[in-house]
Image: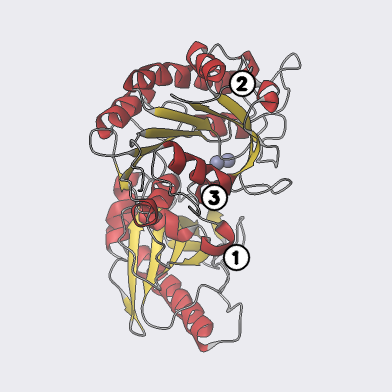
Amino acid sequence: MEKTSDKNKLILIICDGMGDLPTLRGKTPLALARKPNIDKMARAGMNGLLHTIAPGVIPGSDTAHLALFGYDPHEFYKGRGVFEALGAGVKLQEGDVALRANFATVDRTMHVIDRRAGRIDTKDAHALGASLDGMRIEGVEIIFKPTTEHRASLILRGKNLSYKITDTDPHSLGKIKRSEPLENTTEAHTTAFVLNEFTHRARNILSSHPLNRKRKLPANVVLARGASVYERAPSLYEKYGFRSACVAGGALYKGVAKFVGMDIIDVKGATGTLETDVMAKAGAAIRALDDYDFIFLHVKGMDNASHDGDARAKIKMIERVDKMIGALLKTGAYIVLTADHSTPISKREHTADPTPILIYGKNLRGDDVKKFDEINVARGALGHLRGLELMPIIVSLMGYAKVYGS
Ligand code: ZN
Ligand code: ZN
């Protein structure tokens, strides 16, 4: 007879770039932060270190999140653009080519003189974006969706497109580039042609747009980079049978969540910055537990502080997250706390150092780790895990795993 086990709810908290190296007085920001709730979970739960991709591999946020959700990035990662588009609320179709785009200012010789078009505000960017959206080139539909400030998603929709093309973005102040095919196929040639034609037409439309006449640095060009293709993946629900939701500020994280079939819960005050309203996020996560079994809660601030090399801001953000966790502890749900990668203050960039991880909840064996930081968790019961190993553990804790064999 098959045994039906109880189902449990679980909150996965990913603190972007939380892992670090000794930085102040020989200690990491996690070791220095006052975090009574997190340390309480560490004492009662199981701890370890997590290589989100594999030992020695430096994870990007996108590939790391895919792995943590149980999707092998080597199979499912086809570039960042699709996640940005999904996160911006675009409903992608199989085969859509999505690029990250931004408004910039070019001079007469098509040299970029300002990569953010004089820090154009979101409202103006949306008005300009509307004049580019819906264009058709060689039967290819152009979907142009501004997000925040100068940033936008550019989607090419049509038959026989390829994401194997180069960027038009010069990635610095230089002459805007022509997109070139990266492989000798009709699809790649067509797609590069369409992108170049879009860039040309967008330049003409934007140059004569009334909104640009009053701007000192007109948003007169669109730079595009990181072409990617959308291929539908099986959802978490299809794979495991539980309902999942995402609470995040940044479009990229919402996009990866959407990609794996989570519902997105928009939270007022969730900004994806150091100022994000963590208590509003906690409230949203707690309410979501009524309708969902698995909540992915993303906090970005630590990564921002790390790229700025600001240890104190990182410590403060960890302490704010601790308060947020204080509220989540009352739910009785399992809590998994980890990071997508380390971003050491001393390096100001992502590194391959494994991230600390803890699992807290009922019926765990526990270990003798008393404090949650990069050094102490190394002695924990979870040992060294890889990102792809986390979701099976979560599925098991939640009561959705099936016996292998009999
Ligand atoms: Zn990250
Ligand atoms: Zn980062």
Question: According to the image, label 2 marks what residue?
Answer: 367
Question: According to the image, label 3 marks what residue?
Answer: 67
Going from the N terminus, do you reach mark 1 or mark 2 first? Answer: 1
Residue 374 at what x, y percent from top left? 67, 26
SS for tag 1?
loop
Front disc: 2 or 3 = 2
Residue 386 falls left or right of residue 246: right
Q: Is residue 34 shown above or below 108?
A: above
Nearest the eye: 377 or 283: 377
SS for tag 2?
loop
Query: Which of the 4 image quadrants contains residue 18?
Result: top right
Front disc: 3 or 1 = 3
Q: Amino acid at mark 2?
A: Asp
Q: Which residue lies at the image location 72% right of the left edge and 22% below the top edge?
A: 23
Q: Amino acid at mark 1?
A: Lys
Question: According to the image, label 1 marks what residue?
Answer: 175
